[in-house]
Image (tube, rainbow, N blue to C red):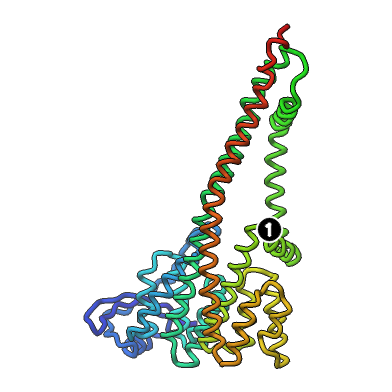
Amino acid sequence: MSDTYTYKVRDKQGKVLQGSLDADSTTLVANKLRQMGYVPLAIDKKSAGMKTEIKLPGAGKPKIKDIAVFSRQFAVMIDSGLSLLRALYILEDQTENKVLAGIIAEVRQDIEKGTSLSQALGRHPKTFNRLYVSMVRSGETGGNLDSVLVQLADVIEKQVELRQKIKSAMTYPVAVLCLVVLILVAMLIFIVPTFKGLYDDLGGTLPLPTRVLLVVSSLMVKGLPVVILGTVGFMWGFKRWIQSDKGRGHWDTFKLKVPVFGKLVRLIALTRFSKTLASLLRSGVPILESLEITSDTVGNTVVAKAVKDVQDGVKQGEPIAKRLENHPVFPPMVVQMLAVGEETGAVDTMLEKVGDFYEREVEATVDALTSLLEPLLICVLGGTVGAMVVSLYMPMFNIIKLIK
């Protein structure tokens, strides 16, 4: 079993660098460093003492934004002529996310042992998905790793940008909905019971809206633990359900049929389909593998099943556009553009244009939804609170009769 050696070297620019290598002897480490273009200054065998590190589950897990930054920096370094190992050394030191830095270190060590970059990345599927690994593999095979990495960085940055736009657009509606729920719960638990005691002393028959409000308040006060447990249980069960194959299929189908929001879900899925497939084909990944990867990364089971059907058709020698016609989730424009792309031999270009078009459609839809939801939610907030206040004060209009 090889040992780990720490080293200090000087590069061609005179800068002193530090790192570690796995090897069987100091001589092998020195030879490997010289092959990398470094001048060894010091090589020491790392202590084999126990090292304990406590990590919380999910703590520091690399986000897609971290992967995007890593990909862009990696692409620029390779495009600038730096060697693969040198680029990984620098990224390992510069990456802020410690978990990602550790993964980069493991990738570097695997490459030093003779593993290819795509194989080393493939050993970390939770960080680098099949799309990432396949495009890197095609770049290695075609000798254009630098251009593929630039393309990968563009793809991931577009995904990050799209997610941020949707997230920022939905922040306000979610905040308002949470505020509405908090106000309703606070009024039902703390304010309405005060009026209940007053009305019980006055006697008489209360208006129907007031009685309904008092009953709901009473149920909320007495059954608050049950309501909390029921809500938590429902959310947990719902999450488990949509994680199952059957539940995910039903949920994705439902999302596509929801008024207004269903259009946005469909546009996002079509954007991912077009951009992902275009990137894979442009980087040289075979068509069948590209379709399989696209179906895994498109983010909607309805679209994924359609892509799987297209893949089966391609296996039988059918054009991509022919099978797409059988799936209503794909608009006629997508089918026609792909048909033209297949006839002219420019499928990747056509898919890129389709992806750009739907990306603009997503932005326009998100802007329109934001403009529509803001006044709508204000009306919901005002109407809900107003209805509760009116229900509480309706008996006051008749309070003289109640007193008599």
Judged from this view, the residue extending furthest toward the right is: 205
Q: Is residue 139 above or below residue 266?
A: below
Judged from this view, the residue extending furthest toward the top is: 404
Identify which residue, 10 or 242, lies in the foreground: 242
User: Would residue 340 be seen by someone viewing this image from the given angle?
Assistant: yes
User: Would residue 134 be seen by someone viewing this image from the given angle?
Assistant: no
Q: Is residue 332 above or below residue 59?
A: below
Q: Which kind of residue does numbered mark 1 sit on?
A: Val
Q: Is residue 192 above or below residue 293?
A: above
Identify which residue, 44 or 389, lies in the foreground: 389
Look at the numbered disc 1 and give the secondary structure of its residue.
loop
- Determine which quarter of the picture holds residue 187: top right
Judged from this view, the residue extending furthest toward the left is: 14
Q: Which residue is mark 1?
A: 258
Q: Position of residue 46 (x, y in %)?
A: 39, 74
Q: Would you say 40 lies left or right of 133 here?
A: left
Q: Position of residue 200 (x, y in %)?
A: 73, 15
Rendered residue at 77%/14% (across/down)? 204
Q: Position of residue 154 (x, y in %)?
A: 45, 75
Rendered residue at 68%/58% (across/down)? 258
